[in-house]
Image (tube, rainbow, N blue to C red):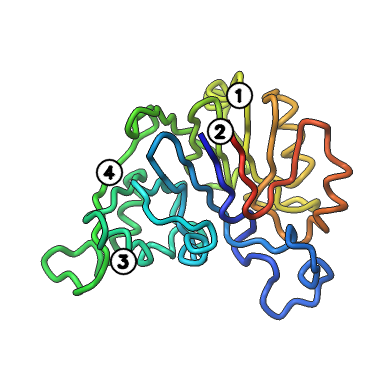
Amino acid sequence: MKITFLGTGTSQGIPVIGSTHPVCLSDDKRDKRLRVSILIEWNDYVYVIDCGPDFRYQMLRANVTKINGVLFTHEHADHVSGLDDLRPFSFQIGSVPIYAQKRVMDDLSYRFEYIFNDKNKYPGAPSVQQNIIKNKEFKLQNLTFLPIEVNHGLLKIFGYRFHNVAYLTDVKTIDNIEKDKLKNLDILIINAIRYKSHHSHLNLEEALILIEELQPKKAYLTHISHHLGFHSEVVKTLPKNVFLAYDELVLEL
């Protein structure tokens, strides 16, 4: 299995438009972060978790020529607004399978009505195959995915566990019953937005406390803002089993 970090930034990405913050002006490639997403590949299967506004470029940059489907964590724009760019894949395979909880699917149906309205479908729009998922495990091909319900402020969203890997983004808190699903992980991928507290995201201190509690073998931090600082400096402060993810980082399992 291979996991590629397509994007590791927050909703604005890094650099932020018009910002003169030193991190936004950095020449270090690792400080340039597209909106958060990962690519999962195993056997001959290819799935994406979330397709935000940078999806088209992420697919080109990673040389992705086919996908089998898209899983969504939640409905915020930085996670879903690239839906229309499923178009080439839809032309290739027909309806692209997408997976989301009902609230998220309803939101997508409203925002992308021209894609979901079969009676008055816009010519050339992508076609999607809707798959409503609940908080229980499901299979994609021969791999089991287990949703992890987390709290993004007041919003209940999904992370996913697969192959002893958990991908959690936009987390602020996790209820104990969901934490039980995160035992004995080889890899935990989790958000850490900045040093200062945030109303709906873990800051670095909170993320490290949670990592210490869950005890994965390795942890990778994502959904990072420029306020966390330079990649080259932050990595020096992290525990030995915690790493700062960056765009195009590949994990081989």
**Position of residue 89 in the picture relative to residue 21 (left or right):** left
In 3D space, how far apart are the residues under numbered discs 2 and 4 (Cα atoms)? Answer: 21 Å
Position of residue 229 measured from the top left corner of the image (x, y, whole percent) = 82, 58
Q: Looking at the image, do the residues carrying marks 4 and 1 touch, with CB atoms under 8 Å apart?
A: no
N-terminal of the two: label 3 or label 1?
3
Position of residue 137 measured from the top left corner of the image (x, y, whole percent) = 38, 27
Look at the numbered disc 3 and give the secondary structure of its residue: loop
In 3D space, how far apart are the residues under numbered discs 3 and 1 (Cα atoms)? Answer: 36 Å
Q: Looking at the image, do the residues carrying marks 1 and 2 touch, with CB atoms under 8 Å apart?
A: yes
**Position of residue 198 in the picture relative to residue 63 (left or right):** right
Mark identifier at residue 185: 1
**Where 227 sits versus 69, above or below?**
below
N-terminal of the two: label 2 or label 3?
3
Q: Residue at x 50, y 39 (%)?
A: 159
N-terminal of the two: label 2 or label 4?
4
Closer mark to the observer between disc 3 and disc 1? 1
N-terminal of the two: label 4 or label 1?
4
Q: Residues within 10 Å of mark 1 (few under 14, many from 20)?
A: some
Closer mark to the observer between disc 4 and disc 1? 1
**Position of residue 172 in the picture relative to residue 62 (left or right):** right
Q: Residues within 10 Å of mark 2 (few under 14, many from 20)?
A: many
Q: Callout 4, which amino acid?
A: Asn
Closer mark to the observer between disc 2 and disc 3? 2
Q: Callout 1, which amino acid?
A: Leu
Mark identifier at residue 166: 2
Q: Which residue is mark 4?
A: 131
